[in-house]
Image (cartoon, helix red, strand yellow):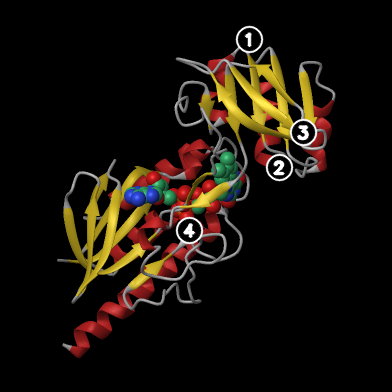
Amino acid sequence: MYELIIIGGGPAGMTATVYAARKKINTLLISKDIGGQPLVTANIENYMGYQFIEGPELMQKFEAQIRQFPVEIKNGVEVKNLAQIKNGFTVKTAEEEEFQAKTVIIATGKKPRPLNVPGEEKLRGRGVTYCAICDGPLFAGENVAVIGGGNSALEATDDLIKIASHVYLISRSSLTGDAVIIERVKGAPNLTILLNYQPTAVGGTARVENITVKNLKTREQQDLTVSGIFVEIGLIPNSDLVREIVPLNELGEIKVNCANGTEVPGLFAAGDVTDVPEKQIIVSAGEGAKAALQAHRYLQRLNEAS
Ligand SMILES: Cc1cc2nc3c(=O)[nH]c(=O)nc-3n(C[C@H](O)[C@H](O)[C@H](O)COP(=O)(O)OP(=O)(O)OC[C@H]3O[C@@H](n4cnc5c(N)ncnc54)[C@H](O)[C@@H]3O)c2cc1C
């Protein structure tokens, strides 16, 4: 039985790992990837110590720091189930491997919110994408649609107007991103902004061929011929693992106290998956540190009691 299992290898999980290792806690880190959301972030200008750094490079530095310690790391592994047992927790992976620990830190972050329209799931990765930075260059010279009206959608639009033949920016309301970036993209000759429109279907057989959008005022529908659809409508927390065990807030985020504890003793959470306000790398890293230190205190109390 491990003393601690950390689920998630983003900024929160990796920082928790370093703090746990320095306390010599017998730790297992399990994650689908090492890096999390910063792996798809081009420019970071607000992580202290670096005036500018690309997300993947910052995460390489985090990884180098965790690899200094003799911590067991299972990368490329998805946790499918978490259950309470008498003296701790059981963690089951997608490959049906099972691990036990006295304490667990959930640091599973967030994932892109899907459109939830017919055709989206079938054509995911075949024209439907959730990462403009990663996939934008694949659509050079083609027609694409960006869905959303916030900063992520506008950043994607700003990238894509330089690459694609034509870009449709489709938002169900007005644009809510920063004025600076709205000004930057607005006049582009290859951009059509459709406000008060909502996607209703994604069409195509082997790959995306079109998107159907509905005018929310007139209820009229129209098909736009596109080969790429960039979904940029926000993120949802990866909290399904604990949905049945601890309370979530209305956004699906895990409720934690100021010491990163949940309602279940020994179960801690940190980073974007929690209800702590402000989803940022520096915040997640700090919360990961706190969670590991609290897990250490909890383990000390267990040892003293036994
Ligand atoms: C496009 C974009 C730009 C951003 N720009 C900035 C910026 O400039 N500055 C800034 O400070 N922040 C920025 N952010 C926010 C920042 O990336 C997040 O706040 C931060 O990454 C959260 O860290 P985290 O460790 O909590 O979660 P995440 O980074 O989401 O990491 C979660 C980890 O958990 C893993 N995981 C999830 N579920 C499971 C499971 N079931 N089993 C195993 N592993 C699992 C994931 O694979 C991942 O490794 C940006 C985010 C995005 C999307």
User: What residue sits 41% from the left and 66% below the top?
Assistant: 269
Name which residue type carries label 4. Val
Identify the residue position indicated by label 4 in the image: 273
Which callout, 4 or 3, points at the residue further toward the start of the chain?
3
Q: CA distance from mark 1 to mark 3?
A: 31 Å
Q: Is residue 195 left or right of residue 286?
A: right
Find numbered disc 2 in the image and state the secondary structure of the residue it sits on: loop
Mark 4 residue crowding within 10 angstroms, few (<14) / some (14–19) / many (20+):
many
Find numbered disc 1 in the image and state the secondary structure of the residue it sits on: loop
Farthest residue in the bottom direction?
Answer: 305
Label 4 CB-ligand 1 distance < 8 A: yes
Q: Badges 4 and 3: C-beta atoms under 8 Å apart?
A: no
Q: Is residue 171 left or right of residue 267?
A: right
Query: Image quadrant for the C terminus?
Result: bottom left
Find numbered disc 3 in the image and state the secondary structure of the residue it sits on: loop
- Residue 145 visible in the current orientation: yes
Which label sits on residue 118?
Answer: none
Pick the residue in front: 204 or 154: 204
Identify the residue position indicated by label 2 in the image: 150
Q: Is residue 28 left or right of residue 257?
A: left
Label 1 CB-ligand 1 distance < 8 A: no
- Residue 10 visible in the current orientation: no
In this view, 175 is above or below 244: above
Q: Badges 3 and 2: C-beta atoms under 8 Å apart?
A: no
Which label sits on residue 141?
Answer: 1
Which callout, 3 or 2, points at the residue further toward the start of the chain?
2
